[in-house]
C-alpha cells in the first residue's frame, strides 16, 4: 500500500467502505492516527488494481504476544464496481504469503455478523470463530451512585500480563495506553482500559470483580470526571452479564461482530 500516496490510500478506503454497515469514512489525519495506534503497516498492507485503477484495500499489521507472532486484519473492502471479481480472496491469499515470510503464527480479524458473504469467505479460507462481540454507544449521565473513584495507572506491564489470549487486537493495552483502577470504600474492585478525548469515552477492557452490580458505579466515576460525554463499549463479548444493564440505561447496540482466527 505504501507504493501509492496517502491521499490515494484514504480515497480508496473511503470509496470501498462507502456502503459499509457502520460508518467508516476517514480523513488523512484520522487514517494515519488509526494506522499508528493499531500498529497497522502500510508496507505489509495491500491494494488491488484492475486495469491500473485502485479497486480494493486490505490493512494489516503484526505484533508479538508472548511466544506468538500475531497478525490482525484491520479492514478489507472492495470498491462497489469491482466486486464479484474475487479480489478479496486474492488479497487475503497474498497477505498469507507475506505472513509466512514474517513467521506469523496466527491471523485474526473481526467481521460484522450480518456480512454473510465476508463471513463465508473467511470460513472457506480457514478462519474459525473465537467470540461474538458487541459494540454499544450511549452518553454518560448521573446515575446517583456515590463512592466510586478512579486511580490512573502508570505501570502498564503488570496489566499487559493479565490480558487474555482471546482479547481483540484493538482492545489491547498496546493500542490504548490509559488504565485506571476502580475503588470504593478503600477496596479495589478491578480496573479499566479505556480511551478518552474531549467529547468521547471508549471502554476497552472492563475488569470488575462483580461487573453487573458495579458497572453503573464505574460509569458514575467517569461521569464525575468528564461529565455527560458520549460513551462507547467496544468489542465486548455479547454474553457479558452487564450488557443488559447498559441497554436498560439507554445504550444502543450499533453492531455485533464475529471475532475469528486462522493458523498460518
Image (cartoon, rainbow, N blue to C red):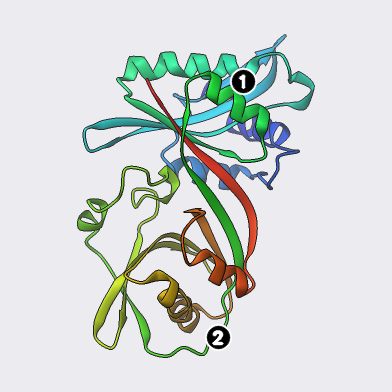
Left or right: 25 in relation to 215: right
Residue at 26% across, 31% down: 68
**Relative to 223, residue 156 above or below:** above
Q: Is mark 2 on a helix, strand or loop?
A: loop
Q: Which of marks 2 and 1 is nearer the N terminus?
A: 1
Q: Residue furthest right?
A: 81
- Residue 51 in percent (x, y) is at 72, 9
Q: Is mark 1 on a helix, strand or loop?
A: helix
Q: Where is residue 111, by image quadrant?
A: top right
Quadrant where the C terminus sits is top left
Q: Where is residue 252, by image quadrant?
A: bottom right
User: Which mark, residue 88?
Assistant: 1
Quadrant where the N terminus sits is top right
Residue at 56% across, 76% down: 140
User: Which mark, residue 142?
Assistant: 2
**Relative to 123, residue 258 above or below:** below
**Relative to 82, residue 128 above or below:** below
- Residue 2 in percent (x, y) is at 51, 24
Closer to us: 122 or 10: 122
Residue at 25% across, 57% down: 159
Q: How crowded is mark 2: few (under 14 residues within 10 Å), some or many (20 or more)?
A: some
**Label 2 vs label 1: CA separation?**
46 Å
Amino acid at each position: 500500500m505504501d507504493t501509492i500516496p496517502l491521499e490515494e490510500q484514504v480515497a480508496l478506503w473511503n470509496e470501498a467502505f462507502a456502503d459499509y454497515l457502520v460508518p467508516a469514512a476517514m480523513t488523512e489525519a484520522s487514517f494515519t492516527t488509526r494506522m499508528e495506534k493499531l500498529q497497522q503497516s502500510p508496507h505489509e498492507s495491500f491494494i488491488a488494481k484492475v486495469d491500473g485503477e485502485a479497486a480494493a484495500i486490505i490493512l494489516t499489521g503484526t505484533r508479538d504476544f508472548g511466544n506468538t507472532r500475531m497478525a490482525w486484519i484491520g479492514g478489507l473492502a472492495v470498491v462497489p464496481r469491482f466486486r464479484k471479481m474475487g479480489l478479496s480472496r486474492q488479497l487475503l491469499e497474498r497477505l498469507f504469503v507475506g505472513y509466512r515470510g514474517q513467521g506469523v503464527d496466527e491471523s485474526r480479524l473481526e467481521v460484522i455478523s450480518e456480512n454473510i458473504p465476508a463471513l463465508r469467505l473467511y470460513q472457506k479460507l480457514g478462519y474459525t470463530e473465537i467470540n461474538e462481540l458487541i459494540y454499544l454507544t450511549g452518553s454518560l449521565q448521573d446515575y446517583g451512585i456515590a463512592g466510586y473513584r478512579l486511580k490512573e495507572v502508570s505501570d502498564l506491564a503488570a496489566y499487559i500480563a493479565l490480558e487474555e489470549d482471546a482479547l481483540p487486537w484493538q482492545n489491547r493495552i498496546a493500542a490504548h495506553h490509559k488504565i485506571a483502577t476502580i475503588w470504593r470504600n478503600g477496596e479495589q474492585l478491578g480496573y479499566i482500559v479505556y480511551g478518552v478525548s474531549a467529547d468521547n469515552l471508549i471502554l476497552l477492557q472492563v475488569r470488575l470483580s462483580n461487573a453487573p452490580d458495579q458497572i453503573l458505579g464505574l460509569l458514575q466515576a467517569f461521569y464525575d470526571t468528564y461529565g455527560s460525554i458520549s460513551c462507547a463499549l467496544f468489542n465486548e463479548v455479547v454474553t457479558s452479564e452487564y450488557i443488559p444493564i447498559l441497554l436498560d440505561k439507554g445504550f444502543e447496540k450499533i453492531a455485533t461482530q464475529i471475532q475469528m482466527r486462522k493458523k498460518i
